[in-house]
Image (spheres, rainbow, N blue to C red):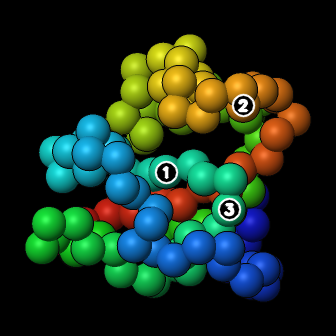
Amino acid sequence: MSTEAEALPPKTCSIDRMITVEADVEKVLSGQKTSTRRNGRYADPGEILELRGRRFVVTKVYRQTLGELTDEIIQSEGYPTVEAYKEYITSMHAGMPWMPQMKVWVHEFREL
C-alpha cells in the first residue's frame, strides 16, 4: 500500500468518471460503497467527488492486486463477497481476465 509520502503517478482519468454506473452511485449514496477499484488512477487524496449534489472526499489512493481481495475488504465496494464482485466486474468488462496478480488502483472516500 502506498504511504502519504510516496508520490503518486499522474492521474489517468478525471474524478468525475470515477463512479458513473447508476447501481454504484446508489451504493455510494446509501453508504454501502466507500471505495472503488479502477484500472487507472482517477483522483488524488483530498479531491472532491460530487454525486447528485452530495460531496465525497477521497481519503486514500493506493495499488492493490486482485489476489489481495477478501470478502471483508470487498464489502467497502458494496458487495458481500469477492466472488460477487468478480461476477459484477467481469460482466461489465467482457473478456477481461481475472488474474490474482493484476493490480488496480483503490480510491477510498467518505461523505463530507
* Nearest to viewer (mark 3 / mark 1): 3
Q: Mark 2 points at which residue?
A: 96
Q: Is residue 65 left or right of residue 21?
A: right
Q: Distance between the residues labelled 3 and 1?
A: 11 Å
Q: Position of residue 53 (x, y in %)?
A: 12, 73
Check disc 3 and give the amino acid type: Gly
Q: Residue at x 67, y 73 (%)?
A: 12
Please tell me how crowded label 2 is: few (under 14), some (14-19), or many (20+) other residues with Cα within 10 Å: few
Residue 82 is left or right of residue 102, and the answer is left
Mark 2, secondary structure of its residue = loop
Residue 50, quarter of the rendered image: bottom left
Instruction: Give x and y (percent) for residue 19.
Output: 39, 57
Where 4 falls versus 25 (above or below)? below
As measured in the structure, the alpha-carbon distance from the residue carrying label 2 to the one carrying label 3 is 15 Å
Q: Element under label 1?
A: strand
54 or 109, which lies in front?
54
Q: Mark 3 points at which residue?
A: 40
- Say which label, 2 or 3, has the lower sequence index: 3
Q: Which of marks 1 and 2 is nearer the N terminus?
A: 1
Identify the residue at the far left of this view: 53
The quadrant where residue 23 appears: top left
Q: Which residue lies furthest to the front in this view?
A: 94
Q: Position of residue 110 (x, y in %)?
A: 32, 63
The residue under the point 22% across, 66% down is: 51
- The residue under label 1 is 36
On residue 74, which mark appears? Answer: none
